[in-house]
Amino acid sequence: MSDTLPLALDGYTHLPKGKVAVTVTYLEMLSRPEISLPSRTDLTLEPWTRPELDAYRALFRSVGQDWLWFARLKLSDDELRSVLDDPARAHFVPYLNGKPAGMLELDFSDPETPELAYFGLVPEAIGGGAGRWLMAKALELVWSRPQTKRLWVHTCTADSQKALDFYKRSGFTPYKLAIEVDEDPRLSGLLPRSAAPHVPIIE
């Protein structure tokens, strides 16, 4: 079967078995917001310089497995090394009581329009305000750069149902929708079959 299918912009498009499809929402922030950084003595943010591949993949899975993150897991060692060594990308790890609690990646490839490329917490860190703290840190890092004119991010229907509202409350405004279709990473073994139970496996 061809990998190219006609897309019905009105109505339904039926996908082949083994595929997943999500609706992607793009959001942007056009000016520096009033940043209120919660006081948290239990949280610190540390730069992650040249992450080891195995450590990066392990944390990536821990943060993103429940939300079907798999783009970085598809990369070969050389491809991932190239991404992680890209000088335009800044990687950070938040620590909660001394333990890695998530990941933050900022992409400054376009210095005037950086991207909040990856933002997430490990499951045990969700729900205690660490997300608000991490977002405040991210916004501080981005908007402290004088060349920043716009910050953008995207989320999708495989993410937490709270993600879109979280970004909006953080000061982002939706500006574009897209549909993403890919091979289901749970069928190829990139992620366990138990990952993202809110997204059905069709095989």
Image (cartoon, rainbow, N blue to C red):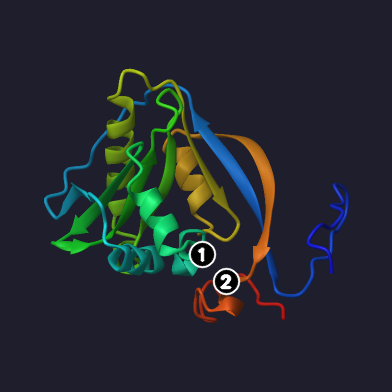
Tell which of 158 and 17 is nearer to you.
17
Mark 1 surroundings: few (<14), some (14-19) or many (≥20) residues within 10 A? few
Image coordinates of residue 30 in percent, x first then y, are 47, 23
Tell which of 65 and 167 is nearer to you.
65
Image coordinates of residue 45 in percent, x first then y, are 20, 48
Residue type pointed to by label 1 = Lys
Which residue carries the number 2 mark?
185
Image coordinates of residue 6 in percent, x first then y, are 87, 54
* Quadrant, the N terminus: bottom right
Looking at the image, tell me whether mark 2 or mark 1 is earlier in sequence order: 1
Residue drawn at the location 36% of the way across and 46% of the way down:
105
Q: Which mark is residue 130?
A: none
Mark 2 surroundings: few (<14), some (14-19) or many (≥20) residues within 10 A? many
Do tag 2 and tag 1 residues touch (Cβ < 8 Å)? yes
Res 124 → quadrant? bottom left
Which residue carries the number 1 mark?
74
Image coordinates of residue 149 in percent, x first then y, are 43, 20
- Taking the view exactly as shown, the residue that stands out farthest to the front is 78
Q: Which of marks 2 and 1 is in front?
A: 1
Res 5 → quadrant? bottom right
Residue drawn at the location 38% of the way across and 22% of the way down:
148
Q: Report the Cα–Cα distance between label 2 and label 1.
A: 9 Å
Disc 1 element: helix
Residue drawn at the location 31% of the way across and 18% of the way down:
146
Compared to residue 27, the image places residue 189 above or below, namely below
